[in-house]
Amino acid sequence: MHDAPLIGTLVSGIVLAFMFAALAHKLRLPPLAGYLMAGVVVGPFTPGYVADGHLAHQLAEVGVVLLMFGVGLHFSLKDLLSVKNIAIPGALGQMAVATVLGMLLGWGLGWPFAQSFVFGLALSVASTVVLLRAMEERRLMETERGRIAVGWLIVEDLAMVLALVLLPVIGLALGGGESGGASLSFAAIAGTVALTIGKVVLFVAMMLVVGKRLIPWILKVVAHTGSRELFRLAVLAIALGVAFGAAGLFGVSFELGAFFAGMMMGESKLAQRATEETLPLRDAFAVLFFVSIGMLFNYQVVLTQPLVVLAALSIIVIGKSLAAFGIVLASGRPLRTALTIATSLAQIGEFSFILIGVGVAQNLVSKEAQDVLLAAAILSILINPLLFKLLDRAKPWLDAREARQLGGTAVPASIEPAAETLVTSTLSGHVVVAGYGRVGRLVGESLHEQGHAVLVLEEEKERVAMLRQHGIETIVGNAARDDVLEAANLPQARALVVTVPDAFESGEVVRVARLANPHLQIIARADSDDCMTHLQQQGADLVVLAEPELARCMLEHLGAPQH
C-alpha cells in the first residue's frame, strides 16, 4: 500500500466522524460529540491506527477559514461598527477576567508567572467554529445577538494575533535566562506591538479601499462566463488566497483574512450564490476541525489531575460566562442577549490550542499545563450544546418577561426586533411557497397577481425585504425547519409549492407538510430522477422535473404552427 498520510487522515477522519456522529444521533447527543470521539480513536493516545496530527490540524484550519469567510459574506462593515461599543470593551474585559482567573489557578498550583499568564490567556478566547455553529443552528446570525457575537470574535481574534506575535519576544525576556533578555524586553515588545498594529491597519485599509471594489468585480466577470465550475473556483480562490496572503504579508490570522474577504465579497449581488458554492466544503472541513481536537486529547490527565481539569473547566464555563453576562447587561442589552453571549463564550478552541502550543515551544508552558487545557477545552465543547439546550428551554420565560416589559410604559431601546419570534399565520385557504429563488418568485408573483392568498417561506433578507414591499406575507427562516412550517399554518392552507433546490431540504419540507395536513396539495420541483422519486416517497402530489418539462414546452412551440 502506498504511503499516503493525507488520504489516510482524510478518510479515517471523515469515515469515523460519520460513524460516531450517527451513533451520537441515535443516543440523542450532539453530532460534535461523535466528531471528537472519532479524533480520540485515531489520536496518538489510543491503540491502533494513528492519523497525522499535523495534517489534521492544517485541514481543520481550512474549515475555520471557510467558516469565517461564510460569516463575512453576510456581515457588512455597518454591522461590525454597530456593535463596536459592546464588542471591544466586552471582549477585552472578559479576556482580562478569564486571564486573571487562570493566573490565580496557576499561582495556587505553584506554576511560574509566565506559564500562569499564557495558560490564563488561552482560557480567555472562544472557539470560532463552536460559537458560529451554535449561532447558525439557531438562525441568530442576522440578529443583534449574532452581530455582537461575531464582533466579539473579531476583537478576540485581533488580540490573539497580537499575543502570538509577542509571545516569542516575551519568551526571550522572561524565559531566556540570559542577561540580554531584560534589556530586550521593553524596546522589543513596544516595537513589535507597533509593527503588528500597523500591519493590521494596513491590511484592513487595503481591503476596504481595494478589496471592496476588486473582489465583487472579479466575481461579476467570472459569473458572466456562465461556468459554474469556474465561479466556484473563483470563490474558493478568493477566500483561501486572501486568507493566506493576509497571514503571509500582514501577519494577521487566516481567519481574520477570510472574514474580510467574505465581507468584501458580500458587497456583490452574487454573495448568496457564493455562500451556496462553499457550503459543502465548509461543512466537511469543519468536521475535520473537531476530529483534530479529539486527536489532541490525552485522557490520562483527567485521571491523574481531575481537580485541576475541573478548576480550568469552571473558569471557562462559569467564570468567563459570568464576566461576559455582566458586561453585556451593564451595556444596557436585554437579558436574552446577555444569556446568549455568555452561553456562546462558555468554551475554548482553536486559538487556545495555538497559543498554548507556542507557549510550549518557547519553554514558557509545561506539557502538563497543555494537557490540562486540552482536556478542559474538549469538555467545554461537549458541554456547550447542553447549555444552549437549557437556554432554548428558557425561551418561553424570556418571551413572557419581554412581553411584560413591552406592555409597560417604557420600552427598552435595546430590545431586539420581534421579527425573530415566529408567529403563526392567520391566513386560511392560502398557498405556501417554500423558497423564493427564480422559480419561487415566478410562482409567487403570478399567484399574487391573480389575487390568491400567498405565504412565502424565505431566509434571505434581501428577498424578504422585496416580498414585504410588494405586500406578500413572509415568514423568515429556512423552510425545512419544523417551527417555520408550523408557523405557516399548513392545516388551513390550500396548497404548498416547494421550490427549494436542495433535495434533502425539499424532502423534509414535503414530509413535515404531509404529516401536518394529509389533504394538502403539494407540488415540488426536482433536478434529477432520484430527487423526483425521493419527493414522491415523502408525499408530494406532483413533482416537476425541470428537463422533461422544458423539452415538452419546446416541442409544443415547434408544433404550434401546424395547428
Image (tube, grey):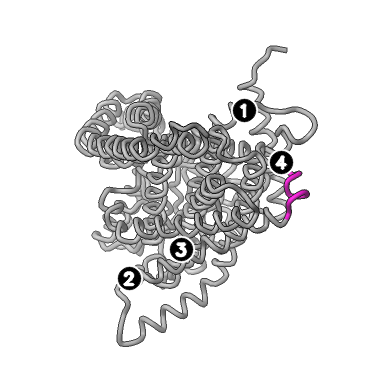
Q: Secondary structure at mark 3?
A: helix
Which residue is identified by label 1?
10
The residue that appears at 69% across and 45% down in the rendered structure is 22
Q: Looking at the image, which residue is at 63% across and 38% down? A: 291
The answer to whether marks 2 and 3 mark residues whose Cβ atoms lie closer than 8 Å is no
User: Farthest residue in the bottom direction?
Assistant: 409
Kind of residue sitting beneath label 4: Asn
Determine if the magenta segment contains residue 305.
Answer: yes
Question: Mark 2 is on which residue type?
Answer: Ser
Q: Hey, which residue is sitting farthest right in the picture?
A: 47
* Tag shown at residue 414: 2
Residue nearest the viewer, comparing 396 with 388: 388
> Which residue is under mark 3?
324
In space, the residues marked 4 and 2 are separated at their CA atoms by: 45 Å
> Within 10 Å of the Cα at label 3, are there few (<14), some (14-19), or many (20+) other Cα atoms?
many
Q: Position of residue 524 (x, y in %)?
A: 48, 47
The CA span between labels 1 and 2 is 46 Å
Q: Is residue 7 left or right of residue 491?
A: right
**Span shown in magenta:** 299-306
Label 1 Cα neighbours within 10 Å, binned few <14 / some 14-19 / many ≥20? some
Q: Which residue is mark 4?
A: 298
Quarter of image, res 450: bottom left
Which of disc 4 and disc 1 is earlier in sequence? 1
Q: Are marks 1 and 2 in contact (CB under 8 Å)?
A: no
The Cα–Cα distance between marks 2 and 3, rounded to whole angstroms, is 17 Å
Query: Foreground: 56 or 531?
Result: 56
Tell whether 366 sits left or right of 245: right
Q: Nearer the viewer, mark 4 or mark 2?
A: 4
